Amino acid sequence: MTTARYTVLYDGACRICTSQVELLAGYNDDDLIELLDMNSAEARARFPQVTPEDAQRELHVVAPDGTLYRGAEAVRETLLRLPSLRGLGELLRLPGAMSLARPLYAWVARNRYLLGGQTERCADGTCNGPAPTP
């Protein structure tokens, strides 16, 4: 594992989140980003600065230098790392774009279980992380 990668901490209990991560993985041929379920013991051990409560609220991306991006900013930084998706990330750099992206992201994050449900591995309530708050 290279330390030069950005690490995307996603909610592995969320069906929408995991489907988006699978999509990202298809664009990550050069292994430029690491995709890590925030509910995993590895994520909690490697990134203690991200509390389980914070992780349940929004996507987190940790840069190689330790900079922490959250929510819509985390989405933008992830897109900027993948050559095939960089153009979308650049759109989020345009003036005013993040003013629209932040509330949209926050709404989806709050409602992700209502919109997409939980993954099968969490349907029985055995996930490691705290229960999401709608």
Image (tube, rainbow, N blue to C red):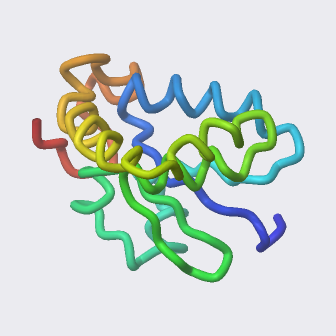
Q: Quadrant of residue 29?
A: top right
Q: Residue at x 44, y 53 (%)?
A: 38
In this rendering, the answer to whether 38 lies above or below 97 is below
Q: Using residue 115 as the reference point, say whether residue 121 is left or right of it.
A: right
* Quarter containing the N terminus: bottom right
Q: Position of residue 21 (x, y in %)?
A: 57, 33
Q: Point out the image quarter for the C terminus.
A: top left
**Residue placed furthest toward the left:** 134
Please state which of residues 91 and 65 is positioned toward the viewer in this rendering: 91
Occupied quadrant, residue 7: bottom right
Relative to 22, 123 lies left or right: left
Residue in the image at 56% along x and 41% along y: 91
Residue 88: image location, x then y, percent: 61, 36
Report the label total. 0
Given residues 91 and 118, the one toward you in this image is 91
Residue 35: x percent and y percent? 62, 48
Give me the residue at 68% from left, 53% from top: 34
Horizontally, residue 28 falls left or right of residue 111, namely: right
Q: Is residue 1 above or below residue 40?
A: below
Q: Residue at x 75, y 27 (%)?
A: 26
Please say if 1 is above or below 56.
below
Front position in the image: 24 or 84: 84
Q: Quadrant of residue 13?
A: top left
Q: Which residue is farthest front?
A: 95
Identity of the residue furthest to the right in this view: 30
